[in-house]
């Protein structure tokens, strides 16, 4: 029977799920945008650069039938933001991650540094932003059988683990974002291209996996509604070239043709007294792809190949985020529900959760962001039945702006 969580001896494709890139960006994006976001140009002389460090703990406990009993991730991210003049910003992100999965009375461990990300942004004009990004392969990309178990479980998209693979080789990316006013609407257009380097995914093997290049296009619209309200919608499309791997003969051949990724999002922000709220809906669809597999005889010789269709899958989410002032404190609550459907049927289910964070300023120079979350849900196991799970998340982030 196929286990929806664990595939022993196989390191998951970095693009196994529809929101892998989104999940991978959460730690970086949250740390940079929420914690070390560079100040506007008008404040460039006040704060020249900023640094942030945090700790993030995520844990899920599963009922019998889902392959694993407990899965945890401890993440320690560090980010640094450096504005160079009024138009140029340099961001750096790195992290140490410790992932553990308990299954059948055995604890499997995958830990070490993750890939390091460097991003440069240049404000070409008030309506145009250029970006360039570099992924340095500092993470642990080659996994043995035990480490592959951890990577497989943490890659379950609906769970939203902040890190799943530790390392996927080097990469370079470039992009441009444009903004334009159209009547009462603000129009945003974006495009990016990512070129990935090959890496060895299996410890003890010299075979190279080479992810296909990625093209991403996005369009967004937003407009003000009434007093203090805003309506926004967006659409993103991702297209991938074929993933390839190196045979023992040294020949590179096609391995996987990932399906196109399509994302739509809709949000509405509004005020109630001294509080602000945002309602949102997101849907991420991955079209079916094609896996190219070798046919092997009893002696292990390759005698041909075949193509296997990999089913489509969809992840939908809806939620509410708020910012509520309670005296001198600001509390930011959040509620959301996620639903994952897959053509294959296994791994389908839902997850609902709620949490909050409390931004604090200490001693007039340091910002801290404690946060917590609790989730419950059900997923379909390899037996075709739905089984329960619950999870907790705890995090703490510290930011320090440095003058210069």
Image: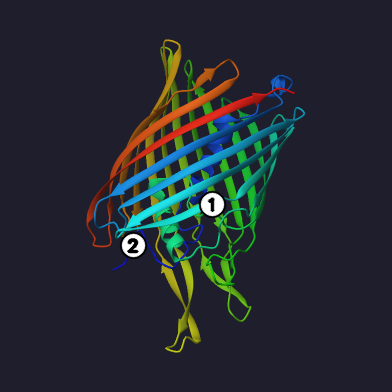
Residue 128, by quadrant, is top right
Quarter placement of the N terminus:
bottom left
* Nearer to the camera, 94 or 102: 102
Mark number displayed over residue 284: none
Above/below status of 128 relative to 23: above
Marks 2 and 1 sit apart, C-alpha to C-alpha, by 33 Å
In screen coordinates, is 296 left or right of 374?
Answer: right
Residue where numbered disc 2 is placed: 344
Residue where numbered disc 1 is placed: 112
Quarter placement of the C terminus:
top right
User: Furthest residue to the top?
Assistant: 327
Disc 2 secondary structure class? loop
Disc 1 secondary structure class? strand
- Residue 213 drawn at (x, y percent): 62, 59
User: Furthest residue to the front?
Assistant: 106
Residue 394, by quadrant, is top left
In screen coordinates, is 32 left or right of 41?
Answer: left
- Residue 154 drawn at (x, y percent): 42, 52
* Nearer to the camera, 308 or 352: 352
Residues tagged 2 and 1 counted as in contact (Cβ below 8 A): no
Write the residue at 42% across / 88% down: 298
The crowding category of the residue bearing disc 1, from other C-alpha atoms within 10 Å (few below 14, some 14 to 19, many at least 20), is: some
- Residue 202 drawn at (x, y percent): 52, 67
């Amino acid at each position: 029977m196929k286990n929806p969580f664990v595939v022993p001896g196989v390191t998951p494709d970095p693009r196994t799920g529809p929101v892998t890139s989104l999940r991978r960006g959460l730690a970086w994006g949250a740390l940079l945008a929420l914690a070390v976001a560079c100040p506007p140009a008008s404040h460039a002389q006040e704060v020249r650069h900023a640094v942030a460090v945090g700790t993030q703990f995520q844990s899920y406990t599963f009922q019998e039938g889902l392959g694993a009993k407990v899965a945890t991730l401890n993440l320690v991210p560090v980010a640094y933001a450096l504005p160079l003049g009024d138009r140029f910003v340099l961001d750096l992100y790195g992290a140490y991650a410790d992932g553990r999965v308990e299954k059948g009375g055995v604890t499997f461990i995958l830990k070490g540094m993750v890939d390091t990300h460097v991003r440069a942004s240049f404000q070409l004009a008030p309506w145009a932003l250029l970006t360039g990004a570099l992924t340095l392969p500092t993470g642990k990309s080659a996994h043995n059988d035990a480490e592959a178990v951890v990577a497989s479980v943490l890659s379950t998209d609906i769970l939203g683990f902040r890190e799943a693979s530790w390392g996927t080789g080097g990469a370079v990316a470039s992009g441009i974002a444009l903004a334009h006013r159209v009547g009462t609407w603000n129009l945003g257009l974006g495009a990016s291209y990512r070129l990935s380097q090959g890496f060895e995914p299996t410890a003890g093997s010299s075979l190279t996996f080479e992810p296909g290049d990625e093209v991403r296009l996005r369009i967004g619209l937003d407009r003000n509604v009434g007093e203090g309200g805003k309506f926004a919608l967006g659409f993103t499309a991702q297209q991938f070239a074929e993933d390839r791997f190196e045979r023992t003969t040294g020949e590179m051949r096609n391995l996987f043709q990932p399906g196109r990724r399509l994302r739509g999002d809709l949000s509405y922000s509004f005020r109630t007294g001294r509080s602000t709220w945002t309602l949102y809906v997101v849907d991420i669809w991955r079209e079916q792809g094609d896996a190219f597999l070798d046919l092997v005889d009893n002696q292990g010789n390759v005698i041909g190949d075949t193509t296997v269709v990999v089913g489509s899958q969809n992840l939908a989410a809806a939620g509410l985020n708020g910012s509520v002032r309670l005296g001198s404190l600001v509390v930011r609550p959040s509620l959301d529900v996620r639903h994952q459907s897959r053509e294959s049927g296994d791994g389908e289910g839902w997850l609902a959760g709620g949490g909050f964070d409390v931004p604090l300023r200490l001693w007039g120079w340091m910002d801290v962001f404690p946060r917590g979350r609790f989730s419950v849900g059900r997923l379909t196991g390899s037996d075709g039945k739905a089984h329960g799970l619950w999870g907790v998340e705890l995090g703490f982030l510290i930011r320090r702006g440095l003058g210069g």
